[in-house]
Image (cartoon, rainbow, N blue to C red):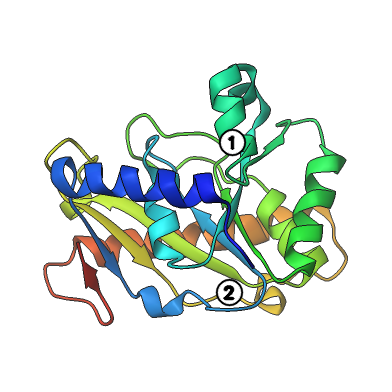
Amino acid sequence: MKRDSLYVIGKSLALTFFRIFMPYRIYNQEHMPQSGRVIICSNHLSFKDPVLLAEVAGKRQIRFMAKSELFHNKLVSFFFNHAGVFAVRRGKGDSAAINLAQELLQKEQVVGIFLEGTRSKDGEFQQPKAGAVMLAHSSQAPILPVCITGRKGIFPKLFHRVDIVCGPLIQPEQLGIEKGSGKEYRQASRLVMSKIAELRDCGQTPKKLEGDVTS
């Protein structure tokens, strides 16, 4: 699938900045599929997170689901609309956004969702939302869990290295969703959140993990 030109340009410029002022290292990038539908689920710490996840995806473009409030700014809205980002109204059961995400996955694309729905101010994990697991179940798409964290668990700061740790794919059948009940969705979202938490623990260990890419 051809990538949007503004996505490619924005990613390249942002990564150049990060390499200088906020170096990063990606671990276990081989877990990222090079083809087929997939949902990237990550924790959310700052504005840089989408760019770092875009680096995880390599040559594939992530179609990010972002809160509709961000589209109120005309300049931001222009950039998002030309970079493959689409809006979702949080807490309102936005069927249009869900339908679009399902359509993208049916076309074997990559959808990016921040599991907590908003940024963490202190680096601690927040209550996960159920949207990602609902989408994974309905589209039968695997989830790639990713954890973004400062070195040794410290909240990322300027000139301090950021670790991006990828985990093994979580297949739809592993989510334990059979009836599609609210309880099942909540349990599944907590499962994904626990996998992300485990990855942060991996990022805090001093030893080199298998399949890491240094930047």
> Which residue matches tag 2?
170
Depicted 72 relative to depicted 42: above or below: above
Which quarter of the figure has residue 41?
A: bottom right
Classify residue 190 as left or right of residue 59.
Answer: right
Q: Position of residue 153 (x, y in %)?
A: 22, 50
Q: Is residue 14 visible?
A: yes
Foreground pick, 10 / 99: 10
The label shown at residue 150 is none
Q: Position of residue 178 (x, y in %)?
A: 83, 71
Q: Position of residue 163 (x, y in %)?
A: 25, 57
- Give the residue type that dot 1 points to: Phe
Q: Which residue corresponds to the image point at 40% horizontal and 49% vertical from the top-left?
A: 11
Q: Which residue corresponds to the image point at 33% horizontal and 43% vertical from the top-left?
A: 14
Q: Name the N-terminal-most of marks 2 and 1.
A: 1
Badge 2 marks a residue whose secondary structure is loop
Q: Which residue corresponds to the image point at 55% horizontal and 33% vertical from the top-left?
A: 79
> Which residue matches tag 1?
80
Badge 1 marks a residue whose secondary structure is helix
- Give the residue type that dot 2 points to: Ile
Classify residue 11 as left or right of residue 157.
Answer: right
User: Which quarter shows the C terminus?
Assistant: bottom left
Foreground pick, 141 / 190: 141
Which quarter of the figure has residue 78?
A: top right
Q: CA distance from mark 2 to mark 1?
A: 28 Å
